[in-house]
Amino acid sequence: MKKILIVGAGAAGLIAAVRAAQTGGNVTLVEANTRVGQKLLKTGNGRCNFSNLHISPEAYNHPDFVRPVLNVWDCTQVRGFFEDLGLKSYCDEAGRVYPVSDTAASVVDVLRLSCRRWNVEVLEGFKAVHLTDTQVKAEDGRCLCAEAVIVTTGGGTKLLSGVGHRMVPFSPVLGPLATDTKPIRGLSGIRVKCALTLTRADTVVDRECGELLFRDYGVSGIAVFDLSRFAKSGDVLHIDLLPDMDQEQVFACISQYIRMLSWRGKSDMLTGLFHKRINEALIRICGTDVHRLAETIKDFALTVHGIADSKQAQLTRGGAAVFEFDPFTLRSNKNDALYAAGETLDIDGRCGGYNLHWAFASGLRAAECAV
Ligand SMILES: Cc1cc2nc3c(=O)[nH]c(=O)nc-3n(C[C@H](O)[C@H](O)[C@H](O)COP(=O)(O)OP(=O)(O)OC[C@H]3O[C@@H](n4cnc5c(N)ncnc54)[C@H](O)[C@@H]3O)c2cc1C
């Protein structure tokens, strides 16, 4: 039996361990924490949105690199793999896939139990500090040897740089954005369904639709998280508060409200259109100028200052440069017996199950190829 060592027992490492053992490997899985799968437990607000019906290479920063793996392990295949381990899943109206139990603990549990079923040796409290393609050393001096090593240490880890892999600098993504706060004063906690456009020097960088949550420091919500993959300080975020209407329709709509001004009074002029506090902010910014109101509703512009709080970001962009790995096998081009999977590679995708899908799909693929 080929001896396989997997470093890091998160999403990618756990599934790689199960797959490597199923396909005939003699597997040891090491984890720095005292428990495996700790981050997985926090995903999807504790519900673990682990895949998406609409998985496609274009949803990731390196489409050509992820394509071969996603061709083998698409949404149906990954769900099927989990189904065989005993995990039932369902899909919501947006295509997001969750365990039927609606708890992330079920995902960790089926993986943990499957490791036991397939005789994977799991060593917790093993923090790898040094690596070759056949050997891993821990902080406490322990040393393990194998015929192949799969690195799945997650985002923001540099283990692979020790074996000569180039690292793309880290930065937090999929998080809330800090913006100008003056225009959004008083709006914290309010959610709107809107269309978002991010521009840099008048060029469109990205567009998203969905829910936005105003915060004291800026904006949050899934659509904002998706935009944050592309946002830089100095970019402008354009919020269209009435995306289903064109400019003319909005103008006509506001003209109707302006006609009510005489009997409603200025402060209640827009009552019935948006949340009271959004109405107040619009009147504060535009007064009763119908053109300005219509324009601002279609283009509520905020200057972006960057990711608001890196601790709230779901992902670390950067990691081991993908051009040094084979996209079909995930094997290192520098070290014959070394593989990598999950977020330790410089791969990031959209919100909605895309990142866990990559972790699982790449973990499965690396395991099969390593064995
Ligand atoms: C709050 C939150 C919510 C999220 N929700 C979702 C979601 O719903 N859907 C989605 O698709 N994505 C979600 N993500 C992103 C998702 O969690 C990651 O994409 C995924 O966990 C990456 O899997 P991984 O196995 O590569 O890394 P990780 O899950 O981070 O696992 C890496 C493991 O390696 C261990 N490790 C690190 N260094 C060492 C070392 N030197 N030696 C030994 N072990 C080591 C770590 O302790 C860890 O257990 C969320 C992220 C966060 C933070």
Image: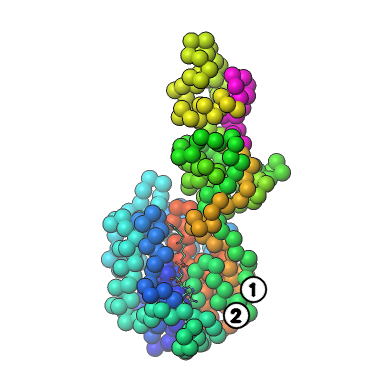
Mark 1 beta carbon near ligand 1 (under 8 Å): no
Q: Nearer the viewer, residue 136 or 312?
A: 312
Secondary structure of the magenta portion, mostly? helix
Left or right of 117 on screen, residue 273: right
Q: Residues within 10 Å of mark 1 (few under 14, many from 20)?
A: some
- Residue 80 appears in which quarter of the rendering? bottom left
Q: Nearer the viewer, residue 112 or 217?
A: 217
- The residue nearer to you, when weighing 234 against 267, is 267
From the viewer's perspective, is the residue at label 1 or at label 2 nearer?
Answer: 2
Q: Picture quarter containing residue 207? A: top right
Magenta stretch: includes residue 292? yes
- Reply above or below: 148 against 271: below
- Disc 1 on helix, strand or loop? loop
Where does the image place residue 193, in percent across and percent down from the top left? 47, 37
Residue to which mark 1 is pinned: 166
Image location (x, y in percent) of residue 306: 61, 51
Indicate the secondary structure of the residue bearing disc 2: helix
Residue at the image point whose x is 62% and y is 71% from the top: 167
Residue underneath mark 2: 162
Residue at 52%, 26% in the rendered image:
280
Residue 198 in view in this figure = no
Number of numbered discs overlaid on the protein picture: 2
Horizontal side of residue 85 vs 322, given as left or right = left
Q: Label 2 near label 1: C-beta < 8 Å?
A: no
What kind of residue is marked 1? Arg
Please report the bounds of the magenta region as a residue range.
286-301
Q: Position of residue 180 (x, y in %)?
A: 61, 41
- The residue that appears at 43% across and 87% down in the rendered structure is 3
- Visual colour scheme: rainbow
